[in-house]
Amino acid sequence: MEIRPIFASLRKHRIPALLIVLEIALACAVLCNAVFMISQRVASIHLPNGIDEAGIAAVTVQGLDDKRAGSDIPRNIQALRALRGVQSVSVMSTLPLSQNNWGWSFGTKADATVADQTSRNVSLYFIGADGPETLGLKLLEGRFFNDGEYADSHFDAAPLAETHVAMITRTLAEKLWPGQSAVGKTFYSLPHYYTVVGVVGDVLRPYIGGAGGPYNYDAAYFPMSAAGSKGALGYYVLRSAPADRDRLVREAEQTLAALNPGAVARGRSYREIRDTYFANMSSMAWMLVLVCVVMLAVTAFGIVGLTSFWVNQRRRQIGIRRAVGATRGNIMQYFQTENFLLSTGGVVLGMVLAFGINVYLMQRYEMPRMPWFYLPGGALALWLIGQVAVLGPALRAAAVPPVVATRSG
């Protein structure tokens, strides 16, 4: 099709054409960045976690005297083991995605301290006997802790376990000793040092930085005795079949509340803990979906409105073209080509704007760089919406009879 008449017509209607181009550009910029942010949040919500999420429940007990908490743990665990359907019980300091993070920095050099810039920040999980089995940790290399290591570990003045053994996640092992086996290696934070006895599958930290965050799986596990825990082991974790989980949450909460009348016991399934952590992120993702839908709808209606206005303004022109032999298909092709040209101008400007917005978000809010394929993806979406939106007005234009058109104004 000859496009010079289209450009000539657009020059006569500069303001409406410019409005459509700017509207499409803004929609493209917002769409690309919004879809990217949605994908980031969805990826975070579905991050894998190397524990038995479906079968785990936890009860926290608050308000206990730290001096008595250690002596109460064996009694509490024994009562929880007696509940019908319980497969395993343990006690630990925190859980993945619990937002209760214990962090410390370690290095692989013998003189490494917590303040060294080369040290790596790690989330600490202090776990009691049967902890790995209760969580469902996947042992990849080495072994779990033995009974003697649990019994000998305790807290002293520092917030680190007074022991010399630890288990670490696969990701942390690869970062500390790339290409090597981590079992038998030692990491340090003077005056403490720990030898790796086992490597487990990646488990999320209590607080993460979103999908693709470089530190999401940097975690280490340390044995801890009930007597030496100084009240740090506040999460009673139960593992069961998923069908028994919700019942056991209620029964475990009631059991611990009865055994510790001066404390507050709160039970939750791990699914609830995870859903709570990602609740705001999920709400933000749905809000961004709504923004995209509204933006695309406004763009489509804008194209429909302006194209309909142009059709009414060009009835005489359409009639003349029909009278000299233009078919209905020619008329429809004219308006679709015109819309394609406007959309192309809009998406080119929109992709530049989308890139600029992403750079701004990277600098101000530590957003990751948007992959390049979001730009052509957004452009394609706007092209399709433009063609669908112009279809109605184009059909009405093609239906104008030549005689009526030539007689009008």
Image (tube, grey):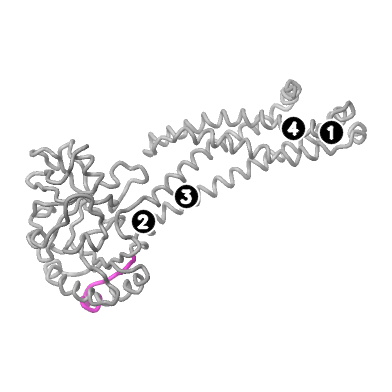
Q: Which residue is mark 2?
A: 277
Residue type pointed to by label 1 = Arg
Q: Position of residue 153 (x, y in %)?
A: 9, 58
How crowded is the residue under tag 2: few (<14 C-alpha within 10 Å), some, or many (20+)? some
Kindly report the distance in space between the C-alpha atoms of the residues bearing marks 4 and 3: 36 Å
Q: Secondary structure at mark 4?
A: helix
Kindly report the distance in space between the C-alpha atoms of the residues bearing marks 1 and 2: 59 Å
Kindly report the distance in space between the C-alpha atoms of the residues bearing marks 1 and 4: 13 Å
Q: Quadrant of residue 114?
A: top left
Left or right: residue 407 versus residue 138 is right
Image point (47%, 46%), residue name: 38
The mark found on residue 315 in the picture is: 1
Image point (63%, 38%), residue name: 384
- Please, is residue 22 above or below residue 77 in the view? above
Kindly report the distance in space between the C-alpha atoms of the residues bearing marks 1 and 3: 45 Å
Tell me, yes or no, whether the highlighted magenta stretch contains residue 264: yes
Q: Secondary structure at mark 1?
A: helix
Please state which of residues 244 and 358 is positioned toward the viewer in this rendering: 244
Q: Quadrant of residue 335?
A: top right
Q: Secondary structure at mark 3?
A: helix
From which residue to which does the magenta span run? 257-269
